Structures are given as structure tokens and as C-alpha cells.
Amino acid sequence: MTANASIAVRSLSKWYGSWRALRDVSLDIDGGTCTVLCGPSGSGKSTLLRCLNGLEEWQEGDVAIGGVAVGYKARELRRLRRDVGMVFQSFNLFPHLSVLDNVTLAPRIVRRRVRRETEEHAMQLLERVGVAQHAAKLPSALSGGQQQRVAIARALAMRPSVLLFDEPTSALDPESVKEVLDVMIDLARSGTTMVVVTHEMGFARRVAGRVVFMDKGSIVETGEPGEFFDCPCTDRAKAFLGNITRN
Amino acid sequence: MAVSDQNMATGIWSGAESDEADAQPHLGPRQRWARRKAILQQAAVLLLVAALAVFVIRNTVVNLQARGLASGFDFLWQEAGFQMAFSLISIDPTSTYGRVFLAGLLNSLLVAALAITAATILGFAVGLARVSPSAPVRYVARGYVEIVRNLPLLLHLLLWQAVVLRSLPTVREAIGLGGFGFLSNRGLYLPAPVAGDAMAIAVAMVVTAGIAAIVAGWVTRGRAQARGESPPRFGPVLIAGGLIANAVAIATLDWQIPVLAGFDYRGGLKLMPEFVSLVAALTIYNSAFVAEIVRAGVQSVGRGQREAALALGLPPKLILRLVIVPQAMRVIIPPLANQYTHLIKASALATVVGFPDLVNVFLGTSLNQTGRAVEIVVITACVYLALSTTVALATSAYGRRVKLVER
Amino acid sequence: MAHSSVSGTSSPLVPTTAVRRLLATVVANPFGTAVCLGLAYLAWTLGLRIVDWAFVNATWVASDRAGCNPDGACWAFIVNRLPQFAFGFYPEAERWRAWIVLIAPPLLLLLAMAPEFPGRRKVLVGGFCLYPVASFILLSGGVLGLAPVPSEKWGGLLLTMVVGIGAFVFSFPVAILLALGRTSKLPAIRLIATGFIEFWRGMPLIAILFMSVIMLPLFLPPGVEFPRLTLAMTGITLYSAAYLAEVARGGLQSVGRGQSEAANALGFGFWAMQGYIIMPQALRAVLPGIVNSAISLLKDTTYVMVVGLFDLLNIVTAALSDPAWLGLATEGYVFVGLVFWSLCFGLSQVSARMERDSERAQLRAPNGGRKAS
């Protein structure tokens, strides 16, 4: 798999029981671009994102990352997930490990790198996201924004070719949101393939190459952020943007 | 969640409108693979367990044949040929192993029932003392708990057996208990009713019905209180009726008081020293654990409850009885039931002091005499599993009831 | 404090000293005070008699019962028999091996209390995991030029330690597998694990010990034989594993789903995820419960008496029938009681401290208090 891989989704459908969460979704994402998925809650945007690294299993369709199909055997999935970083809404840092160990654990265990090498790399990453001085602390001693930045560093430590963000700022207080968005903007500008589920329209406007609007399990509209925000084509997108700006 | 509910609704709605496939979830290749993998994994584990079982059963059959041991459950109808030092049903050398099993089981149940009752009463007393407003009382209770629960149960038992009971006087100098009972190093002598089997059964039925009536009356009252309704009228009637029935039944019996004759007391009920020390050790040991459960339960009731009751002007004693304990019971009951299971199992220690409980007469003597190891172990295991399952089921039934009342 | 909120009278007289607080209690609760005074009187008279018996009139050195003061404790019995109570019938020339086995656990515990140093956890975990195997090899001998000593000769506190720590350590991996099985998504595996756990939890330990001595030899291929100690330890290990599995299951349930998702997303496999991420958190969450299981197990080791093993309690009980030292049950059992009490009470204090620490950590976590490590 190359660095900054492209993503291809072909007619993806998913049911939870008898409820259809994704209906025939197709999407192509170029390598090195930042794509923002948005839409009302329950529109399937998080589900789609979680399908990209096989955290959700689906019934129909295919997903390929960097030209490699996302398989369903445990070993194939594990190999894929090494190269697909993910950042969660609730951080999901490992509370029993120090910040540094949080970042180095996966490279050491999953990629079998030696400790010294991973620690050097981890310190560079922590420096980059601005929490290097907290490396020895436990995650519970950090603020939400700091924790989320550590989570980003943890994902980066695996040197992924794609980064997935699942509402990374929804659980944060307004001050922390900016810290995290700054890091994400920096990443997007450095040319990493990113797929971001977020309600932060300012972020989308500034760095997204493309905005994908979803509703009721399908992609309703895609476009450049400029076009999308200024003159959305569909009524549903208009209604959604209206709601967001009113709040 | 509200959001997903709403989407559920829209999903179903649009499914009915647009495409058929919506309402019909089906398996994709991923689900088929996952299902196949699950079946394979389970089959592998089951195969492994089956292989182990075959290995064990084959070895057992070979070993039993090599030792010339018979098998089968027919021994239950054979004559056991031994005496039991204590039994609730009459046992003589011509009794069958089945009857011996029953007698042992009844003895185990008797020990467990007595110890559970006593440990609960003592444990609640100590547990409430653990949260007493008076600091010295708290310290004394804490000391009791810490000393008792950090010693092995078997040591408690041997201490009672060797030290306390040995220091009791001989039969001739037995301590009188109000003229009705006597305590000596040969055991505890209590008055017992003299009656034929039929009479005893009739009385036992009346007493049981009486107790059931009292419990039913009490429970309906409690339920009504929990719901905030006034208790139904028949509650007190049930309680009073039960009490009167019991009193009459017990009074009609002809009580025989033990009398000293020669070297031993005659008549009445003689409880062997092993029985007394077993019940005492089980009671004391478990009371410490019950006390800790009670303390945790009382402390689980929020401070606000106590303060609210104080603000209403309730006197402290009533606060404990009316506000704290009823709420604490929800926290107390599950671990308490757990402790009862422990106690029932621990009553098997009777074997060590030679009291004829189930494990002693069945897993011990009967197994030695018949050699039916597999059968006897299976029966014993079933009995104990049935007992612990009963307690577990009763607890979960209580849990469900409490949940309902809470709503 | 609790008493002031119930009695409700202490607000005007703010208790600053112990005496004042005591006085406030007395005023608030005359009944409790009367009970206390009664108990205090009882404790005083009883205490005096106990001190007289245990110390003032006690005899520490004597060659038999006749040499002891009949009014006091005859500790000479314990003193004379101490080596036997500690090691059983372990041959005198080989006692140094028994010494090592007996001294190692307290040394490891001291290490656990000692301040942090690099690799401490590794030494501790490794030490406790190796202990049963190493002590088994050291005690039985037959290798490395050590004279073989059959396990029938092991006894006393030595046996209590070997059985207790051995069964605990061996039961750990079994318990973890059982807990994972019981929380598995696969119904067959869940059923097997649940059945296994409930079977061992439902049986009395006494019955399990009988069973393991009677049944296990029947299960084994003809010709394969194990000493009683091994059979009994197998039974105790499985019994303890079932209880420990339930404790571990509680821990597993306390670990959020996000943890396994994060591990999955990073490419961890099932066992690596359990080993590095889920289990460390789960077991840490229930550490007090684990220590409590260890305390129960330590007390339960005394049950090996019923299958004829001479642990500390049984060897003392056996010594009570020595004609030279008849009638000293009180002294013997007080000694055993002191040993067990100090071990169990010590462990329970460790568990209580852990519980307090974890509560404090939980209070601190949400508002981001500092914790240096």
C-alpha cells in the first residue's frame, strides 16, 4: 500500500437488523486529499467511516483502500488496519498506559519495532501535536483537547496511509476544539489522505477538498466546500445547513 | 436513543415506499464468513471437550474394571448396614443407602438452616453495630468482625470442638437451661415432642402453613408499603391466624423434658457436641461476613436520605428502621444469598468433626463400602448444585421484584 | 462524620478532640454508652485473665507437659515443635531448601511495598509466577544434585504456602480463559465456560477434595499416578479458578467497548488486545477482589486436612495427641490462629488500601487532576 492511499467505495449497503443504515453508497476519494462527511445524526456517515477500516461489517458492496479490497478475514483486516489510522469521538486512549506508551504500544506490538525507535518517533509526533511535555503522564491527567491530540499522535505512530476521524471534536469543550482542529488542519495541509466526520463547517470550508453530504443512509450531494456551503443543490442539504447555522 | 428511533421509523417508512430489500436484511459474504467461522470455532472447542470426555470415560471404565468395582445405581436399594449417630429419620443397620442418603441430606439441611438463621440474626446485630452512632460500639463490632473473618472456618470449628466443648461440665454437673434443657460435654439436651409419625407430620404441616401465612401477610404489607398504598386488610388477619395456629399446634404436643438417668439424660432431643460446635462455628464465622454485607448495605444508602429523614423530625432509631434498612435491603440481599450458598457448602465440614452430614455418610462411608465412586460423586454434585441453583433463582426472582417496585 | 449526622446534636459542640467527641457520643446515646461500659468491664477482666494466662504464668521452656505451670499457657509445646510446624517431616539435612521456599513470599511482598524502581513489576510478576514451579522443583529435588524428598514429607506452614500460592498462581490463567469464555459471543463456548464455572462454584471444597483424590486417579490412564498433594492441588486450583473467573469477568465488564475498538483499529489481534489492553485494565479494576479471593483461598487450604495432608492446622492438630503434650489444644490453636490471622489481616489491609486508592483515582479522573508516574 502506498503512502496517502486512495479510497474507493462501490455500492455499499448495510443493515442493522431490519433497518438499512447505508443504501448503495459509492464514493471515490483521491490520495492526499481531505474529505469531510457531514449530515444529520443517524444519516450513516459514522457507519460509512467505520466500514472503511472494517470496524463495521456490511452486507453488499466493496471497499478498497489503495487498490486493496477491505477483506473480512481477521488476518486481512489486521493488515489493513495497520495502515488506516482512526481517531474516535471519545479518544479511547488506553487509561492504564502513559501518554508515551499509548503512542508506542501499537508500533511495538503490531509492527514489532524496537522500543527505542518507536519512542523517538513518538516524541516527534507528540512534539508535532504539542503535548510532548506530558509524555510521562497518564491520559486521565490531561484535558480533553490534549487527550484527543495524543489520540491523533497514536494513530500517526503507525505511519498510516489513510486517517479516519469520527467526530473528533464533538466531546470537547469549545476551547479544546480549536487545539484539535489546528492539528488536523496541519495534517491536511501536509497532504495526508483524511476522511473526517464532523459538524465543524469552518474546518470543512478551510481545508476540505470535498464535502460529502449524507442523509438517511445515502450520499445526497458532494461538492467543493465553496459550492456546497454557498449554494447547496438539494433541499435536504439546504435544510441541514440552515439548522447548523441557526444553532 | 431518540435519534435512532426516529431513523428506524423513517427507514421503515421509506422501505415500504421504495425498495423491497429494505425490510429484508440478508447475509452478505461477510456475514456468511463470520457465521462459518463461528461455527468452525465452536465445533473445534466442542470436539476438544468431547475428545477429553472420551479419554476420561475410557480411562474410568478401564480403571473400574481393573479394580473389579461394580457400577450402577442399584446400590441405593441395598442395605447399608451402618448406624448414624444423629438423624432426623430413623436409621438402623437394615436401612438402604437411599435412606442413608436422605438422612444425610436432612442433617446437612438442618445444620445449614439453623446456622443461616443464627448467622443472619447475629450478623445483622453486629452489622448495625458497625454503623452505630456510638464510636466504642463501632470499634467493638469492628474488632469482632476482623478477628472472626480472618481465621479459617476449620480453625473455628476445631476450637469449638476442642476448647469450648471440652471445657463444659460432665453430664452429672450439666448446666441447666431454665430447667428445660441441659448443656454438658456430651452435647445439648432439649425437650422434644413425643408423638407418632402421623401426629408429627400433621403438626409440622400446620406449623409450615402458619409460617407461610405469616410470611404472606408480611410480604403483602411490605409490597403495599413499597407502592405507597395502604396495606390490604387480610394481611394482619393472615399474620394473626398463622401465629395462633402455630401456638395451638405446638401446645397440643406432649413435650418430654430430658431427665438424668444413670450416665446420660433420657428422653427429649439430644444434640451431639459435634452438631453444636458445627452450628456454632458456622454461625460465628458467617456472622462476620453477614455483618460486613449489612454495613455495606447501610452505607450505600445516600447521606441525603438520612438528612431528609432528620429534617422531617424522625428520631434516629426510627430512621434506621423506616428509612435506611428498607433501602439497604436491596443492596444486602444478593450478597447475603451468596453468603448463604457459601454456608450451605461449608456445612460439609461436618465430616471433619464426624457429624453425619451428606458428605460424611454418602461421599465418605457409603462410597468406601460400595465403591460406586462415579455414581455417588454425581449424586452429591447434583444435590449441591441444586441447592446453590435454588438460592440463585430465589435471589434473581427477588432482584426482578425489587426492580419492578423501584419503577 | 456519620455519628454526628445521625445524632444531630453535635453541631453546637464541635468536637475537636477525641475526648470531646467521646463525651458528645455519651450524651447523645446513653444506651450505647451503657453497652460500652459493660463491654469495657468484660474486656478488662477477661483481658487481665488472658494476659495472666498468656504471659505472666506462661512457660516457654520445658521438655514436656509436666514441666509447664498448670495456671498458664504452655508455649514450650509450640517452641519445641516449631520446626515441625514450619516444615512438617521434611528431612533436617535438607531444611535449607524449605527455608528458601518459606522466606521467598514475604520477601516478594516486601518488594511489592518497596518504592518503585525500574523493572519492579517484572520482578514481582515473574517472581510470583515462577514461585510454585520453582518451589516444587526445589522441594521435591531429584534434579541438580538435590536429594529427592517425596511430597508426603512436606508439611506445616511450608505446605500451606505451597498449596495456597501454588493453587492461586495456577488458577490465574485458567480463570482468565474461563472469564473470556463466559463473555464470548459464541454460545457453545459461553455454555461450556458457564457450566464449568458454576459446577466448581456450586460444590463444597470438601467434596471437591474427596473427588480429586478418589476420582482423578480413575480419570487418568492406568499406570499414571500422582501423589495426593498434586491431586488435592488440582482440585483446589480449579475451585479457585472458578471463583477468580467471576472476579475477572466483573473486571472485563468494566472495560469500555471503546478500548477494544481502538485496539482493533490499530491492528491488534485478539490475544495481543487481551494481553496488552483489555486484561491489564480489567484485572487492575478488580484487584481488591483478587486479593480477597487470595485470602479466602489461604483460609481454605486448611481443608486439605480431610485428604490427609499435614498443613499447618493439621500438623498442630496431630501434635495435640502426643502423650508428652496432652491437653494443649488452646495453645496449639491460638498459635495457628495467630499465624493465619496475621497473614489474612495483612492481606485484607492491602486490599482495603487498593480500594481506597482506586476510589481516589476515580474521583480524580474526570476533572483532570495530576498524577505523576
Image (cartoon, coloured by chain):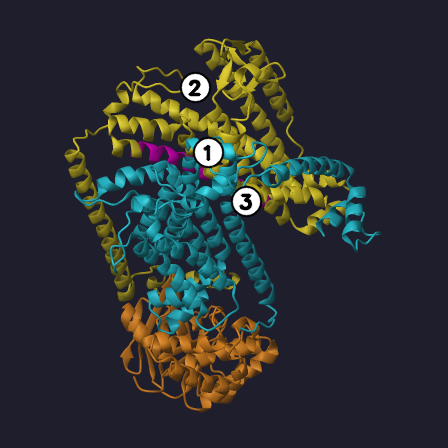
**Residue under circle 3?**
B403
Measure the C-alpha gap from mark 2 to mark 1: 39 Å
Look at 56% across and 58% down and name the residue there: C353
Tell me, yes or no, whether the highlighted magenta stretch contains residue A216.
no
Q: Is residue A177 above or below residue C198?
A: below
Disc 2 packing (10 Å; few <14; some 14–19; many ≥20):
few
* Location of mark 2 (residue): B88
Q: Colour of chain B?
A: yellow
| Residue B238 screen position, x and y as percent | 60, 23
Q: Quadrant of residue C215?
A: top left
Chain where mark 2 sits = B
Label 3 crowd bin: few (<14), some (14–19), many (20+), radius 10 Å: few
Q: Nearer the viewer, residue C79 or B52?
A: C79
C242 and B264: which is toward the camera: B264
Q: Which mark is residue C173?
A: none
**Tag count:** 3
Around disc 1, counting alpha carbons within 10 Å, would you say few (fewer than 14), some (14 to 19), or many (20 or more)? some
B404 in the magenta segment: yes
Start-end of magenta stretch:
B378-407
State left or right for residue C138 relative to residue C67: left
Q: Is residue A55 among what the camera can see?
A: yes
Eye-nearest disc, 3 or 1: 1
Q: Which residue is mark 1?
A: C325
